[in-house]
Image: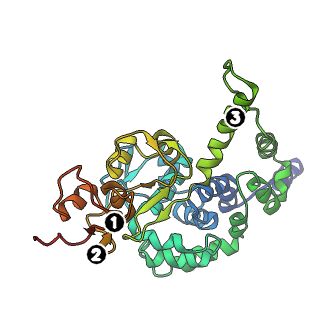
């Protein structure tokens, strides 16, 4: 009997001596890097993304998260072509998206906010103002719970998630370690931290050999090095025409580089922007969603260098609609000083 009590005591002591965290803490440790990655790409506060993930998954314990890697309860909708699963939420057996990896769910959540008109005003807010974002999400109709904003804020402040709004991909693991010092005993986490230190060091760029002068070779090396920096400098903006998502091309680039960065098909980008070439030029406007049938002003007076395509891009209007409103033939170009109609059809002479 005495040995039995000793064994029970040992097991109890072992349980309380072991490193344990609540499911919310484990969730933060695992998924904070994903939230920070999305913040860097889409300017959504990491604290907001992480708080939404915590709430939607009950700290990673929900059926949608565990079986479908769906961390934000995003339903199928008409544009989803990936895997699906049935789950009873607001109604029985609703269709929800299934992802191969939780990182895909985080990315899809960012796109859900960034590319829908309902959330345009969110991106006018300070990306470090998590309170404004929480109330902005509720106002935009993200959730029906009247206390949704307060619930998000409570989680952010309880778990100090605002700390992640001041980090980046290179420093997020240090922020996690600062919040959870006991992780320095976790070999897996510390191995990730060590790997992060290695990957943040300058990398050797391999340039294919080509017979050329040293000066030309160095110029080619610099072009390869700076292309990634150029792409990272691009910001998604909201157009005055109903908040349409667009970017301004900072340097001459290929369409494929934009396709790779935003994971939008080349076919869609071509269609939305009426493109006939793969080459994008400095200061070109490129829309990341379909343009509108009308402009945001009534008329525009052309200047030297204007053509119908750049006018359509400038005002976020479909090119064919612009031709129709101005009673012009496809391919016809305006004269300098011509009045172009953007909302209503040009009056007949």
Task: Indicate the secondary structure of the residue bearing disc 3.
Answer: helix
Q: Name the residue under label 2.
A: 298
Q: Which of 164 and 26 is in front in this view?
A: 164
Task: Please indicate, yes or no, whether residue 63 appears anywhere in the rendered image.
Answer: no
Q: Residue at x 84, y 56 (%)?
A: 182
Of the image marks 1 and 3, the number of the one nearer the N terminus: 3
Q: Is residue 273 above or below residue 296?
A: above
Q: Is residue 236 above or below residue 143?
A: above
* Residue 26 at x, y percent in the picture: 69, 56
Looking at this view, name the residue that lies furthest to the top: 211
Q: Name the quadrant containing residue 45.
A: bottom right
Inter-mark Cα distance, 2 to 1: 13 Å
Give the left or right position of residue 223, taking residue 251 as reference: right
Q: Mark 1 points at which residue?
A: 302
Inter-mark Cα distance, 1 to 3: 39 Å
Q: Which of 301 and 166 is in front in this view?
A: 301
Q: Which residue is drawn at 76% across and 26% down?
A: 214
* Residue 325 at x, y percent in the picture: 19, 65
Give the left or right position of residue 254, taking residue 309 as reference: right
Camera-nearest label, 1 or 3? 1
Q: Mark 3 points at which residue?
A: 219
| Dots 1, 3 in contact, CB < 8 A | no
Q: Name the quadrant containing residue 36.
A: bottom right
* Residue 71 at x, y percent in the picture: 52, 56
Q: Residue at x 76, y 36 (%)?
A: 203
How many neighbours does mark 3 have within 10 angstroms: few (below 14), some (14-19), or many (20 or more)?
A: few
């Amino acid at each position: 009997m005495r040995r039995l009590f000793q064994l029970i005591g040992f097991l109890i002591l072992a349980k309380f001596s072991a490193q344990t965290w609540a499911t919310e803490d484990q969730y933060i440790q695992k998924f904070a890097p994903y939230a920070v990655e999305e913040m860097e790409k889409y300017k959504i506060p990491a604290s907001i993304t992480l708080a939404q993930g915590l709430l939607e998954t009950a700290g990673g314990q929900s059926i949608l998260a565990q079986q479908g890697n769906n961390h934000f309860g995003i339903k199928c909708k008409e544009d989803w072509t990936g895997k699906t699963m049935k789950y009873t939420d607001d109604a029985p057996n609703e269709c929800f998206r299934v992802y191969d990896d939780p990182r895909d769910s985080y990315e899809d959540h960012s796109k859900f906010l960034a590319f829908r008109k309902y959330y345009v005003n969110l991106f006018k807010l300070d990306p470090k103002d998590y309170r404004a974002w929480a109330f902005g999400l509720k106002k935009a109709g993200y959730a029906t719970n009247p206390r949704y904003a307060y619930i998000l804020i409570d989680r952010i402040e309880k778990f100090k998630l605002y700390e992640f709004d001041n980090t980046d991909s290179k420093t997020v693991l240090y922020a996690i370690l600062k919040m959870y010092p006991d992780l320095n005993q976790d070999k897996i986490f510390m191995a990730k931290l060590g790997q992060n230190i290695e990957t943040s060091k300058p990398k050797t760029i391999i340039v294919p050999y080509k017979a050329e002068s040293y000066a030309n070779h160095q110029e080619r090396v610099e072009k390869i090095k700076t292309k990634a920096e150029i792409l990272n400098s691009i910001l998604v903006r909201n157009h005055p025409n109903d908040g349409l998502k667009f970017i301004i091309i900072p340097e001459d680039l290929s369409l494929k580089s934009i396709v790779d960065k935003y994971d939008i098909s080349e076919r869609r980008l071509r269609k939305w922007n009426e493109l006939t070439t793969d080459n994008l030029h400095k200061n070109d406007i490129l829309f990341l969603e379909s343009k509108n049938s009308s402009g945001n002003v009534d008329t525009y007076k052309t200047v030297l260098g204007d053509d119908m395509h750049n006018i359509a891009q400038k005002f976020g209007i479909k090119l064919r609609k612009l031709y129709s409103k101005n009673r012009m033939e496809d391919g016809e170009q305006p004269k300098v000083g011509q009045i172009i109609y953007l909302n209503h059809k040009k009056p007949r002479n």
